[in-house]
Image (spheres, rainbow, N blue to C red):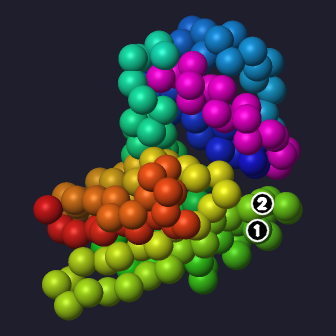
Amino acid sequence: MKGVIFNLLEEVVVDSYGDQTWDDLLDAAHSDGVYTSLGSYDDRDMTRLVSAAGAALELPDDEVLRWFGRHAIPHMVKRWPDYFTAHEHTIPFLRSLNDVIHPEVRKLYTGAYCPHFEFTSPADGSLLIGYRSPRRLCGLAHGFILGSGDHYGEALTVEHVECMHHGSSRCLVAVAAA
């Protein structure tokens, strides 16, 4: 996993809970906390940090990932404003992930592995997003979706229709205006 994700996690934790909480999470996860944005780190480092946060907050890891993703979006907007200003609404932004954002991420962060998304637009105006990733971080994707809605001032509902954590080969997420 690229270090920039760890950097975002640190920013979100420090903004919400302070430097000491980040240090406590690093200690609980047995991590030195040295993550450079261009570096690559074992996925298990993130798993340990998320589990440490879940234990401290008495929350399931999936909820920690959702919280992280949602609160990371404002930091992402600051880092990469062009990705967000190119759109006026959440759905077109989400649709740009495979074709615009992830190719740019791969250019900026050599060796970055990005999940693949499949999009379907039902007649009701919602968006169905198929998510495939061996990391199975659908909770993080869920949080990113909610945070994107917050950014664009749109209340969204996000429902997991299928989930890899429940035996499916992919996650299928329905996104609709609330």
Asked if residue 76 lies left or right of residue 63, the reply is: right
Q: Look at the picture and state if 147 lies above or below 127.
A: above
The x and y percentages for residue 112 are 77, 60
Q: CA distance from mark 2 to mark 1?
A: 5 Å
Q: Please report the residue visible at 63 percent of the width from the left and 61 percent of the height from the top.
A: 133
> Label 1, on which residue?
106
Q: Residues within 10 Å of mark 2 (few under 14, many from 20)?
A: some
SS class of the residue under badge 1? helix
Query: From this viewpoint, is residue 151 visible?
Result: no
> Which mark is first along the chain, 1 or 2?
1
- As drawn, 68 above or below 154: above
The residue nearer to you, when weighing 115 against 13, is: 115
| Secondary structure that dominates the magenta span | helix
Q: Which residues are magenta?
A: 37-54
Q: Position of residue 117 (x, y in %)?
A: 53, 74
Task: Specify the farthest residue to the front.
Answer: 167
Label 2: which secondary element? loop
Residue depicted at 59% across the width and 78% down the height: 98
Which of the labelled discs sits on residue 112, or is there none?
A: 2
**Quick one: quadrant of the C terminus?**
bottom left
Residue drawn at 75 percent across, 15 percent down: 30
